């Protein structure tokens, strides 16, 4: 598990002492000191799939875009459809560079007229902010360091919110509600139903205490967050996405509406158009290793006859599927599900099979 991160002294979220008191093991991640586990990754992962897990994601950056027409402006920097984003809705987007690579993946919410809100990866904050400021000169680009984020994920998350925070539950996946100084979205990065709560930093502790007091809720760390998103087939920046990988290669064409794909009027549009017409050099796939031994990121892939066949970008043990799972990039000739490949793991060959994504179907509220 790795997200591109700075090398300076790690920062701490407002809930650092809460995590330590709860028995968390703290580790550096993306420039922050974050909880990787409490009771154990498998237990926390399973709790999220069956009940409701609470994650501190206050390390992520909240950025407000304010101005007369922030949607049209933001479309200059992304292939996503922003002008069609209704009020009270949220959308996944990619920020692309002129070469067609991914600068970052993020979420954008339409909060109010003239007000969009981005949530970007912690380790890309120092890249994203200058990029947004330079590319959106007509807007006020404001990092909201006064705000933090909690994520409550799992099949019982909605019922918990209705009991603990009545009136704050958005109705369906990617809906957003704002109540006083809280913004709550029906979203998350686990494949499960749940919410993400953006709140003033000084309120995070009180909100966390109220949520964790419910017997259906337990803390979960970055270890479980990683295994959950991997089973859900979701990308991690720095592993499955970087500035050399295109949206087409990453299998994220669904995040680009037809009108944007056809216009190609965004950074890297020429490359995206070419890859859509001719096919990419390689593509992201799921991988199922044989046996019980996980195949980690960085492992090289070869075909049955020894030809180069790509690389593993994410891998680990999937507690829900009770088996190792991985993702990687392979040439189109090897991308068909069922294709046998070989991964080199510490000098040993491990048989893997190309698999469809996700490994665990999403459980979003539709």
Image (cartoon, rainbow, N blue to C red):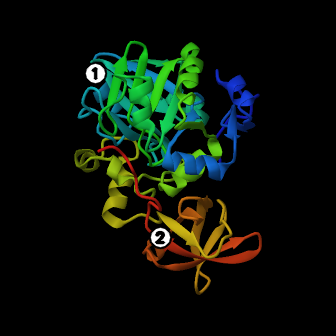
Q: Quadrant of the image for the C terminus?
A: top left
The residue under the point 64% across, 59% down is 297
Q: Which residue is mark 1?
A: 69
The residue under the point 68% across, 36% down is 35
Q: CA distance from mark 2 to mark 1?
A: 42 Å
Q: Is residue 162 left or right of residue 243?
A: left
Residue farthest to the front?
215
The residue under the point 33% across, 43% down is 365
Q: Which residue is mark 2?
A: 355
Q: Earlier along the polypeptide chain: callout 2 or callout 1?
A: 1
Q: Position of residue 335 (x, y in %)?
A: 45, 72
Q: Is residue 317 left or right of residue 149?
A: right
Helix, strand or loop at label 2? It is strand
**Is residue 238 something one can see in this rendering?**
no
For the residue pair 252 and 180, the one nearer the viewer reads as 180
Q: Is residue 131 left or right of residue 254?
A: right
Question: Vertically, is 310 above or below 273?
Answer: below
Question: Vertically, is 4 above or below 148?
Answer: below
The residue under the point 60% across, 63% down is 312
Q: Is residue 343 left or right of residue 320?
A: right
């Amino acid at each position: 598990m790795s997200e591109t991160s700075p090398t300076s002294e790690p920062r701490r979220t407002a809930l650092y002492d809460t995590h330590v008191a709860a028995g968390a093991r703290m580790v550096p991640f993306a420039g922050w000191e974050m909880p990787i586990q409490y009771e154990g990754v498998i237990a926390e992962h399973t709790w999220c799939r069956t009940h409701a897990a609470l994650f501190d994601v206050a390390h992520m950056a909240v950025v407000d875009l304010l101005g007369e027409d922030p949607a049209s402006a933001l479309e200059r920097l992304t292939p996503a459809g922003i002008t069609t984003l209704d009020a009270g809705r949220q959308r996944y987007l990619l920020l692309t560079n002129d070469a067609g690579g991914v600068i970052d993946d993020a979420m954008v919410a339409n909060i109010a007229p003239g007000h969009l809100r981005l949530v970007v990866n912690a380790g890309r904050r120092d890249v994203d902010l200058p990029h947004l400021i330079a590319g959106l000169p007509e807007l006020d680009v404001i990092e909201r360091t006064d705000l933090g984020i909690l994520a409550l994920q799992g099949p019982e998350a909605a019922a918990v919110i209705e009991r603990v925070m009545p009136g704050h539950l958005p109705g369906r996946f990617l809906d957003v509600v704002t109540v006083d100084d809280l913004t709550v979205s029906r979203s998350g990065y686990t494949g499960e139903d749940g919410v993400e709560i953006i709140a003033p930093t000084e309120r995070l502790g009180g909100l966390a205490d109220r949520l964790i007091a419910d017997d259906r809720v337990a803390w979960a760390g970055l270890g479980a967050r990683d295994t959950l998103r991997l089973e859900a087939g979701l990308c991690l920046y720095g592993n499955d996405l970087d500035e050399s990988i295109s949206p087409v290669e990453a299998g994220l064409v669904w995040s680009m509406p037809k009108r944007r794909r056809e216009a190609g009027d965004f950074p890297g549009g020429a490359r995206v158009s070419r890859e859509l017409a001719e096919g990419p050099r390689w593509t992201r796939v799921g991988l199922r290793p044989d046996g019980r031994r996980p195949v980690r990121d960085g492992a090289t892939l070869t075909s049955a006859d020894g030809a180069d066949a790509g690389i593993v970008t994410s891998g680990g043990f999937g507690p829900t599927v009770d088996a190792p799972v991985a993702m990687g990039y392979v040439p189109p000739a090897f991308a068909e599900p069922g294709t046998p490949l070989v991964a080199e793991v510490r000098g040993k060959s491990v048989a893997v099979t190309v698999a469809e994504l996700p490994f665990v179907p999403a459980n979003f509220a539709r």
